[in-house]
Image (cartoon, rainbow, N blue to C red):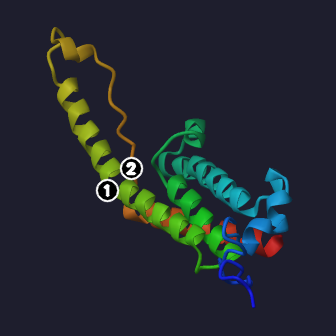
Amino acid sequence: MRPVGELAISSSSWLPTSHNSVPTSPSFTSSSSSRPVYMNYVLLSALAAFALAQSIKVFTTWYREHRWDLKQLIGSGGMPSSHSATVTALAVAVGLQDGLGGSSFATALIIACIVMYDATGVRLQAGRQAEVLNQIVYELPAEHPLAESIPLRELLGHTPPQVIAGGLLGTMTATIIYLIS
């Protein structure tokens, strides 16, 4: 008969093997942790989705405004949302790699929801307020101390279609990279 502290470890349990041991999980000993960072599927999916979204913004700006704006490669705002694409790719990649039942997927999903909510809520409203404040400053007389102030950035947040497009881009990117690898 085994002492109480020595319990069998199954592939799906977190049970200690002795009184002083720390619970272990089979996932911590997998070979995925020994792969180099450039082979990290989750990281590659998120970075690829970000790069694609930022690149697409250059073309959507050209289509809408008939001018090339390479600042879009590093700027925020616009179509599609690179924040949404990145966090959605991250969550989908974690879900595809580790399954939907784990705490890693839950964490990635909650972070994705917070980022996308923030993009359409707080950041979008801050951009709209900046637009109004810039108009007020523009209409000030030239001798007013604020008349020479630097304009506030107006393109901060995203509209719901921009966030949805970013989410779809992130989902497709993570899925395609998963199927390729």
Residue that lies at the very extreme toward the bottom in this rendered image: 1
Q: Is residue 123 shown left or right of residue 134?
A: right
Q: Earlier in the sequence, mark 1 or mark 2?
A: 1
Say what amino acid the circle numbered 1 marks.
Gly
Q: Secondary structure at mark 1?
A: loop
Q: Residue at x 52, y 40 (%)?
A: 75
Q: Nearer the viewer, residue 147 or 12?
A: 12
Q: Report which residue position mark 1 lands on.
A: 121
Please say if the residues under marks 1 and 2 sit with CB atoms less than 8 Å apart.
yes
Say what amino acid the circle numbered 2 marks.
Gly
Q: Is residue 11 above or below residue 121?
A: below
Image quadrant holding the C terminus, namely: bottom right
Q: Is residue 143 shown left or right of residue 170?
A: left
Question: How far, Cα to Cα, is label 1 from label 2?
Answer: 8 Å
- Work out whether residue 83 can be spotted: yes
Q: Residue at x 66, y 70 (%)?
A: 19
Q: Is residue 57 above or below residue 170?
A: above
Q: Residue at x 82, y 71 (%)?
A: 180
Give the image quarter of residue 1.
bottom right
Q: Report which residue position mark 2 lands on.
A: 157
Q: Position of residue 14 (x, y in %)?
A: 65, 77
Q: Position of residue 150 (x, y in %)?
A: 33, 21
